[in-house]
Amino acid sequence: MTALLLLTTSLHYLAIIPICKNYQSIYIYRLYSNVIMVSTTFSMLWHYYNTYQLMIMDYYFATIWFLFDIGWYKELNNNKILILNLIVFIFNIIIINFDNYVYYHNMWNIISAIKCMYISYLIRNIKIN
């Protein structure tokens, strides 16, 4: 089951694709891409090694990613960003005590990755001053 968890977690890396064209020219896209990479990597390490320290790092970088998304929400004034983040967050809280948690966490990873790709798609053409 660990392999499937790593696979579904790795889908978050795809969120970088929509913003790649702006990666070299706009600092905020580079920073956002790096947060995606580091957050996803810590999440995968936590799922593989299952240590408390990696869990803390995973949640720390996930929080930074969430704060970035709130910033994009403010920049775009797009309620979808806020609503999608809220749905993904609530789903993650709900499944914590479910039997077969890993199965539901795989589902959460897929839903979360789709949300992340969608937000990257929305922000791909923002002109930052």
Image: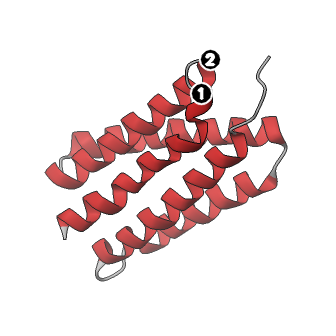
8 or 62, which is in the foreground?
8
User: Which percent across, then down, holds residue 57?
Assistant: 33, 37
Residue beneath the point at 52% across and 69% down: 91
Q: Is residue 51 above or below residue 106?
A: above
The N terminus, quarter of image: bottom left
Q: Is residue 119 above or below residue 83?
A: above
* Disc 2 versus disc 1: nearer the observer: 2
Q: In the image, what residue occupies the spot 62% across and 23% down?
A: 28
Instruction: Check whether the beta carbons of the residues at disc 2 and disc 1 lie within 8 A of each other.
Output: yes
Q: Where 62 sits versus 24, above or below?
A: below
**In the rendered structure, which amino acid carries the disc numbered 2?**
Ser
Q: Is residue 35 visible?
A: yes
Asked whether, in this view, residue 2 is left or right of residue 42, the answer is left
Identify residue for label 2.
25
Q: Residues within 10 Å of mark 2 (few under 14, many from 20)?
A: few
Residue visible at 60% across and 36% down?
A: 19
Quarter of the image where the C terminus is located:
top right
x then y, percent, for residue 38: 37, 34
Judged from this view, the residue extending furthest toward the bottom is 99
Q: Is residue 45 left or right of residue 79?
A: left
Instruction: Give how far apart the Cα atoms at labels 2 and 1 are.
Output: 8 Å
Most foreground residue, 62 or 118:
118
- What colour scheme governs how the chains and residues are painted in the rendered image of this protein? secondary structure
Q: Nearer the viewer, residue 15 or 102?
A: 15
- Residue for badge 1: 29
- Please rate how many residues cluster around mark 1, counting C-alpha atoms within 10 Å: few if below 14, some from 14 to 19, many from 20: many
Residue 123's spot in the image, x, y percent? Answer: 70, 40
Task: Name the amino acid, label 1.
Answer: Tyr
Q: Secondary structure at mark 2?
A: loop
